[in-house]
Image (cartoon, coloured by chain):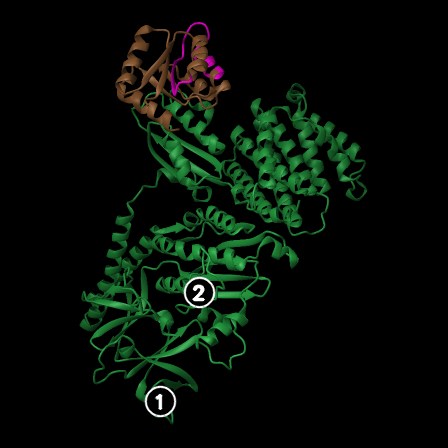
Chain colours: A green, B brown
């Protein structure tokens, strides 16, 4: 069986578990506390899972190191159970941390295909020594730990033969004893974990994201007057256990007694969606509220008690209000400036500063991790892959990157479109892939990352890449590109793909390619104030990247007059503004469809005609130059009215008109203004 | 077709009361058991949609009966009937495979809610 397609999955999961180990150790260090049973349990489970997965993948060094660590944790757990947790000391966390750090290196080595190196001998020796020490009869222990410690140390040393690592016998011999040592009390854990790994690795069909489980924190509040709330809590646990693996609970399971207050927090690993977990919890009865969050959002229990739920509409209303406040702030500043009164100006500046702070605060409140939208994609990808009979390994990165709530709602569909495209057109069938020497399973990655002021969401596949020649031929046959053009670079390619009605799909499938293509995605992204990029290499794959502002609600815009209407042009797209007369004066010829600015001939778009308005006397005397994905276009307008922050309102355009405008806004004086979709001018 | 119920309780009073509540809600009481042993036997014989199970019964208690029944049929839908103060026992019953519980004295609405949950699961 070809295991390579599970390698990245292994890496992702192993990293998750290593992160969980880091977190547990960090908490231990912060509280300067004796390890509790729960902490050691969590560490043990993480180590155990890594070992199982590594075993299934045949990554011997990872498995050996994880096994030695697991044995150590088993011994530590035994110790904690006997009330001797304090005797573990700092050696415990130090050792665990060292082991986790070393494991991270071996995991990467293994996945990246570097030659396996034996685990660090000194580290293994320490793990073995402490395991033996902590497993030693506790009666002896009570008489003096140092004595036992040294005795075991010397035993291990003599087995190892020498302190010198170079002379140490092969690693395997030393660990063999550990490997054969039974771990009786963990037989159950071992059983289900290995079963999990086995089923994950075997894979039943052509797709394996089913095996990706996420750690969720489920907070449950029971009705205060419900009887036997602790039993309800037990029911909740039973139901969650049916859907995943319960890692820990707060309060701990043993303390679910009569005094249980009715608030339960469960940390659970599950492949199920948040909704499914919530439904299961509600089914336990007497549940007042349930909240399911990803692990990464958790900031400790204190944090969860300090948060409140707010109706989304309230949040939207708040944003609208603050938007208008921002606009009236600008007017206030303007009026104050004109008044010439220093006191008024100082007061206006003060108010302005507070409004800005308020705006920031509210925008922050609206940020939501992209994971909320991403979480539904593994299933979607699997279903689409199954429908199209493709083998896909799907990975997601940057789930905790935050975006504005309304943006998040709006990017879901474009991402779905890109994922479907990638599976349908990008990734080849397993047989085709094998024929060209690629792994049978295509790799599809959905990634969110922060890049300067923007958020980039990228969909990357390792498929056949976009056939530039075909796109060019198609574009030329449709008259979109002059016949003399020989090649398309990435920028020209995306500009073409983003044009309405342009599709190169050879066949129409149920999934994509109905003539509605990248252009829909592009216009949606532009409406959000973002842009789209593409990178593609024949036979190597394609990456579509959506570059989005972190928040969409308020943008800086230049207000322009065209006919009797005011329009807003996003300031980010404008490179310069000039008078048309100056342009004409500087050039020898007066053409109507192009202008020459700084020796560059730019297409001239008269917005007046573009928007279907009747030209006035001073029509088109001003020119603004906008940059559309690297292409510059000159737009003639009647007058420039100045820059302003505007609040972008959802815009339900009639069909066909959407290509011109990306949204609408309300100006300071209450008049509406349409926001020009700059991308559609190119 | 109405859902079938097997009621297990050593007290006639409780059986009658639970029976009335469920009958009025349209359930079909197909059998009653006074002991855990009877409960197990009748379950196998009647295959009811729902079992209500008292915890303390002579001749095999309710919890052991739950274990026996779910051993034969893991999908058995068993509702525990408990008194206040039996928390630890109810927990045990749920770990043994019972799907939900109600606390005596019974309020018809709470019994029916619990029954709905058990049947929905």
Which mark, by number, is residue A591? 1
Residue extent of the magenta highlight: B47-68
Left or right: A54 in relation to A617: right
Question: In percent of the image, x 41 and y 58: which residue is there?
Answer: A414
The residue carrying pointer 2 sits among few (fewer than 14), some (14 to 19) or many (20 or more) residues within 10 Å by Cα, namely many
Q: Position of residue A361 (x, y in %)?
A: 32, 53
Q: Position of residue B110 (x, y in %)?
A: 29, 22
Q: Which mark is residue A156?
A: none
The answer as to whether the residues below labels 2 and 1 share one chain is: yes
Quadrant of the frame with the C terminus of chain A: bottom left
Q: Chain of mark 1?
A: A
SS type, badge 1: loop
Residue B52 belongs to magenta span:
yes
**Mark 2 = which residue?**
A532
Say few, some or many: other residues with alpha carbon within 10 Å of mark 1 (under 14 / 14 to 19 / 20 or more).
few
Give me the chain letter of mark 2. A
Q: Quadrant of residue B78?
A: top left
The reply to whether residue A136 is visible in this rendering is: yes
Q: Is residue A98 left or right of residue A241?
A: right
Q: Is residue A450 magenta?
A: no
């Amino acid at each position: 069986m070809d295991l390579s397609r599970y390698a990245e999955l292994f890496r992702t999961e192993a990293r998750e578990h290593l992160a969980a180990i880091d977190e547990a150790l960090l908490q231990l260090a912060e509280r300067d506390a004796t390890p509790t049973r729960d902490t050691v349990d969590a560490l043990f489970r993480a180590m155990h899972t890594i070992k199982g997965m590594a075993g299934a993948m045949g990554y011997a060094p990872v498995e050996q190191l994880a096994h030695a660590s697991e044995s150590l944790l088993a011994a530590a757990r035994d110790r904690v159970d006997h009330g001797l947790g304090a005797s573990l000391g700092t050696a415990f966390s130090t050792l665990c941390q060292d082991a986790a750090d070393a494991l991270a290196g071996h995991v990467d080595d293994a996945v990246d295909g570097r030659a396996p190196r034996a685990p660090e001998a000194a580290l293994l020796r320490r793990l073995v020594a402490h395991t033996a020490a902590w497993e030693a009869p506790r009666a002896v222990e009570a008489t003096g730990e140092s004595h036992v410690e040294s005795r075991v140390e010397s035993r291990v040393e003599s087995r190892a033969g020498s302190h010198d690592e170079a002379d140490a016998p092969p690693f395997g011999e030393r660990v063999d004893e550990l490997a054969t040592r039974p771990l009786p009390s963990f037989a159950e854990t071992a059983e289900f974990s290995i079963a999990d790994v086995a089923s994950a690795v075997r894979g039943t069909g052509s797709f394996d994201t089913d095996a990706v489980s996420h750690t969720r924190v489920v907070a449950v509040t029971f009705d205060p007057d419900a009887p036997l709330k602790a039993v309800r809590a037990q029911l909740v646990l039973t139901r969650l256990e049916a859907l995943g693996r319960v890692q820990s609970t707060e309060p701990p399971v043993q303390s679910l007694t009569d005094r249980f207050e009715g608030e339960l927090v469960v940390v659970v690993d599950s492949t199920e969606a948040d909704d499914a977990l919530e439904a299961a919890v509600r089914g336990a009865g007497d549940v007042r509220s349930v909240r399911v969050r990803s692990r990464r959002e958790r900031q400790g229990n204190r944090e969860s008690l300090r948060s409140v739920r707010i109706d989304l509409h309230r949040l939207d209303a708040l944003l609208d209000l603050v938007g208008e406040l921002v606009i009236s702030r600008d007017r206030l500043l303007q009026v104050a400036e004109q008044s010439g009164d220093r006191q008024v100006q100082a007061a206006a500046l003060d108010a302005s500063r507070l409004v800005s702070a308020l705006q920031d605060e509210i925008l922050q409140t609206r940020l939501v991790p992209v994971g909320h939208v991403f979480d539904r994609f593994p299933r979607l990808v699997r279903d689409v892959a199954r429908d199209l009979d493709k083998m896909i390994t799907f990975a997601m990165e940057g789930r905790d990157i935050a975006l504005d709530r309304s943006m998040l709602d709006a990017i879901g569909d474009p991402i779905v479109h890109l994922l479907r495209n990638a599976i349908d057109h990008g990734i080849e069938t397993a047989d085709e892939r094998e024929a060209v020497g690629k792994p049978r399973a295509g790799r599809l990655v959905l990634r969110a990352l922060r890049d300067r002021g923007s958020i980039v969401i990228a969909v990357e596949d390792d498929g056949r890449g976009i056939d530039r020649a075909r796109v060019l031929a198609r574009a030329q046959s449709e008259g979109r590109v002059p016949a003399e053009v020989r090649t398309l670079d990435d920028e020209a390619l995306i500009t073409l793909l983003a044009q309405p009605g342009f599709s190169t799909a050879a066949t129409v499938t149920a999934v994509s390619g109905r003539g509605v293509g990248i252009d829909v995605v592009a216009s949606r992204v532009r409406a959000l104030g973002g842009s789209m990029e593409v990178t593609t290499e024949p036979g190597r794959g394609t990456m579509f990247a959506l570059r989005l502002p972190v928040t969409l609600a308020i943008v800086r815009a230049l207000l322009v007059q065209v006919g009797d209407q005011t329009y807003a042009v996003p300031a980010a797209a404008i490179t310069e503004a000039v008078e048309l007369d100056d342009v004409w004066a500087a050039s020898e010829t007066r053409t109507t469809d192009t202008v020459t600015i700084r020796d560059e001939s730019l297409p001239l778009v008269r917005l007046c005609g573009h928007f279907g308005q009747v030209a006035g006397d001073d029509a088109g005397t001003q020119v603004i130059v906008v940059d559309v994905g690297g292409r510059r276009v000159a737009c003639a307008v009647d007058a420039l009215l100045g820059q302003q922050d505007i609040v972008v309102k959802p815009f339900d355009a009639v069909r066909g008109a959407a290509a011109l405008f990306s949204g609408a806004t309300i100006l300071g004086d209450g008049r509406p203004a349409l926001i020009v979709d700059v991308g559609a001018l190119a | 077709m109405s859902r079938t119920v097997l009621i297990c309780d050593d007290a006639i009073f409780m059986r009658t009361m639970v029976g009335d509540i469920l009958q009025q809600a349209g359930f079909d009481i197909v059998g009653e058991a006074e002991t855990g042993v009877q409960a197990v036997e009748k379950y196998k014989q009647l295959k009811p949609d729902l079992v209500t199970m008292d915890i303390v019964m002579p001749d095999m208690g309710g919890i052991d009966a739950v274990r026996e029944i779910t051993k034969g049929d893991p999908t058995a839908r068993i509702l525990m009937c408990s008194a206040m103060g039996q928390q630890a026992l109810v927990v045990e019953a749920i770990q043994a495979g019972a799907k939900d519980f109600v606390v005596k004295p019974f309020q018809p609405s709470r019994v029916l809610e619990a029954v709905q949950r058990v049947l929905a699961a």
